[in-house]
Image (cartoon, grey):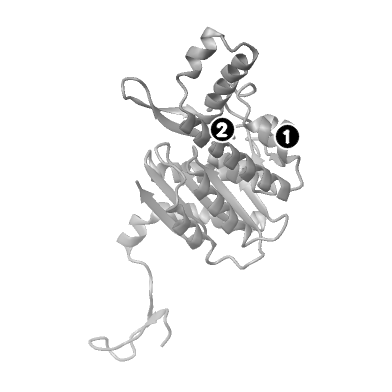
Amino acid sequence: MTDSEITGGGDTPTGAAKRPLSKTPMFTARNSARYERQAVIKEIDDAERTHLICYVGGPNTEIDRNDIIGFVDLLHNIPEGEPIDLFLHTFGGDVDACEKLVRLIHANVVDSSFRVIIPDVAKSAGTLMALGANQILMSDTSELGMIDPQFPMRDNQGNEFWHSVIAYLDAHDEYAEALRSNPRDPVALLRLDNFDAKVVRKFQGIRDRVRTFAEDLLKRQGLPASRISNELMSPSRWKTHGQPVGHADAAQLGLPVTYIPSSDARWTLYWKLYCLQRLAIGQNGKIFESAFVSQVLDE
């Protein structure tokens, strides 16, 4: 008897036909969406000759330390040294978690075999993850973003809001420079009084942490690390944290972007997969998926 057959026994008449094991109709129906997504992933794997792993997060989710569990599962069945494509959609999150995830992927691939596909959005820490790739696949729907860290603060009424670390430090430096030029400048004196020295030092550390990480990733690709990281952190170039950095902008910065037209059959398949996964996670979920793994988490 094999594992894929059910043989006669018990009340089954001797000599009865053997029936192969199969998924029950209800199980198949309840998991049909997953089977459809994984069939698309398998089709992409075969066409691209790679291992596609997917990390797609809803608008209300962030990259965090718990994501390591999903990534370890995604990489479990990929032989060391084989090419990996990361299908990435996220609005950002924890920089330390981002670094851990990128290092994990780098430990499993060889040079020039890690690509990131951006179907829609990879902002902030998501952009940092993309900087770790040898190639970034983008289309007309794709966007990266500033790597300007955001930090929660409270206004005078106690309301929490997210503040740009770079903008905060730029404003501090502007008023400090004004005072160096004119120690009696009343506007600079008043404005500087609103800055907390501890917050300034903390924000300087956060800024330097992000810049160093970005430059390390870019140097790994042999790219002009300082120039690109400074451009991606520049509030004078990107007027808001959410301003799109499209494929043309990313290529102009010097990132290793490959543009695929949205009408191209390759991109149509990527977009189909993205739509199926977004339907699965809604606003608050995350999906970790490959041809072998499918974890949908609702936060």
Q: Nearer the viewer, residue 178 or 229?
A: 178
Q: Residue at the spot x=57%, y=58% of the render?
A: 104
Residue 17 in percent (x, y) is at: 36, 83
Image-based side of 21 in relation to 89, left or right: left
Mark 2, residue position: 148
Structural crowding at the residue carrying mark 1, measured as other residues with C-alpha within 10 Å and reported as few (<14), some (14–19) or many (≥20): few
Is residue 51 something that shows in the picture? no
* Residue at 37% in and 22% down: 155
Instruction: Locate residue 119: give its quadrant.
Output: top right
Left or right side of 60 for 51: right
Q: Looking at this rendering, what residue extends furthest in the left direction?
A: 11
Instruction: Answer above or below: position of 36 versus 2.
Output: above
Residue at the front extreme of this rendering: 183
Q: Give the Cα distance between marks 1 and 2.
A: 15 Å
Tag 1 residue: 227
Q: Is residue 8 left or right of residue 34?
A: left
Q: Quadrant of residue 252?
A: top right
Q: Position of residue 68 (x, y in %)?
A: 47, 56
67 vs 162: above or below:
below
Q: Nearer the viewer, residue 27 or 56?
A: 56
**Disc 2 residue crowd, few under 14, some 14–19, many 20+, Cα 10 Å:** many
Which amino acid, mark 2? Asp
Q: Is residue 92 above or below residue 294?
A: above
Whether residue 287 sits left or right of residue 140 in the image: it is: left
Image quarter of the N terminus: bottom left
Residue 288 higher or lower than 156, as above or below = below
Depth order, front residue of 10/188 = 188
Residue found at the far bottom of this picture: 14
